[in-house]
Image: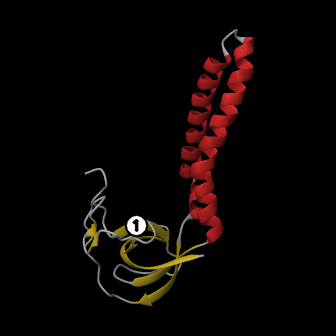
Amino acid sequence: MAEHIGIVIKTESGNFAQVVADRKGACGGCQSTPDGCRSCLTSAKIESREANPVNAEAGDLVKIHLSSTNLLTGAAILYLLPIIGMLMGAFAGILASTAFDLTEIIGSIGGAITGLIVGYTAVITLDRSPSIRRRMMPTITTIVAHNVGIPYVKNASCCG
């Protein structure tokens, strides 16, 4: 069970909110500065969309919860589906190569590429599914303090 503390920066219709929280676990902090990580230039804060069943308002300090099951399921979908698709495609390509009188290498490579594309398409389709997205979304569980203010978040990325 992952729990974080964040500040609501904007509320949205349908009981959702944009929350900013400290980035944790992604960086070892070896080159940290108050503005973020020097090695990849990312911000020390992360902004995300959360379910808001407690009706937190902009500026509220809130506790955010994401169950370990949802975290592991999301990671499995993101990483394993393309790999499984690629392996299944490679094996199917080997079998299909005999039917089309191709070498096994050509069939394997073509099948692996096709399987990888199918795997990534499945990941994108699952990500865009409203029911799955809602089930896997972090949830605001508690309002810790009301109206603490909205922080300034500097947008930066590793890509420049």
Q: Is residue 37 above or below residue 89?
A: below
For this rendering, which residue is in front, 38 or 62? Answer: 38
Viewer can see residue 21? yes
Give, as a three-letter code, the residue at label 1: Cys
Q: Residue furthest top?
A: 101
Mark 1 residue crowding within 10 angstroms, few (<14) / some (14–19) / many (20+): some
Of 124 and 102, nearer the camera is 102
Tell whether 33 sits left or right of 9: left
**Residue drawn at (25%, 66%) of the image:** 154
- Residue 32 drawn at (x, y percent): 30, 71
Image coordinates of residue 87 in percent, x first then y, are 67, 36
Q: Quadrant of the N terminus?
A: bottom right
Label 1 belongs to which residue?
27
Can you give x and y, in whole percent of width and height, for residue 47 in the image? Answer: 38, 67
**Res 135 seen here:** no
Question: How many numbered marks appear?
Answer: 1
Q: Residue furthest bottom?
A: 145
